[in-house]
Image: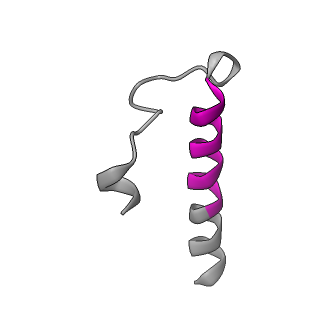
């Protein structure tokens, strides 16, 4: 679901210092999901 529905900010070269709050929230969510999947295995 992450790859198909959510935008990739690394491909867009998003600067986190200039990111909007919704972009930071989405970035944090993706990091959280990735961490949970990696901890699961």
Residue at far left of view: 4
Q: Residue at x 33, y 52 (%)?
A: 5
Q: Residue at x 65, y 60 (%)?
A: 32
Within the magenta stretch, is there residue 26?
yes
Residue 7, position in %: x, y?
39, 40
Within the magenta stretch, is there residue 7?
no
The vertical placement of 18 against 33, above or below, is: above
Residue at far right of view: 17
Q: Residue at x 35, y 54 (%)?
A: 3
Overall secondary structure of the magenta section? helix
Q: For this view, does 12 lie left or right of residue 18?
A: left
Residue 29, position in %: x, y?
61, 54
Residue at far front of view: 22
Residue 20, position in %: x, y?
62, 24
Q: Say which quarter of the image contains residue 33.
A: bottom right
Location of the N terminus (image quadrant): bottom left
Front residue (pair 36, 7): 7
The vertical placement of 30 against 24, above or below, is: below
Front residue (pair 21, 37): 21
The vertical placement of 8 against 6, above or below, is: above
Q: How many discs mark residues in the rendered view?
A: 0
Front residue (pair 35, 26): 26
Q: Say which quarter of the image contains residue 41.
A: bottom right
Residue 17, position in %: x, y?
70, 19
Q: Residue at x 59, y 20 (%)?
A: 15
Residues rendered magenta in the picture: 20-32
The vertical placement of 23 against 19, above or below, is: below
């Amino acid at each position: 679901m992450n790859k198909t529905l959510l935008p990739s900010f690394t491909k867009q070269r998003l600067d986190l210092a200039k990111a909007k709050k919704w972009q930071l929230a989405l970035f944090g969510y993706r990091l959280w999901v990735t961490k949970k999947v990696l901890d699961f295995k």
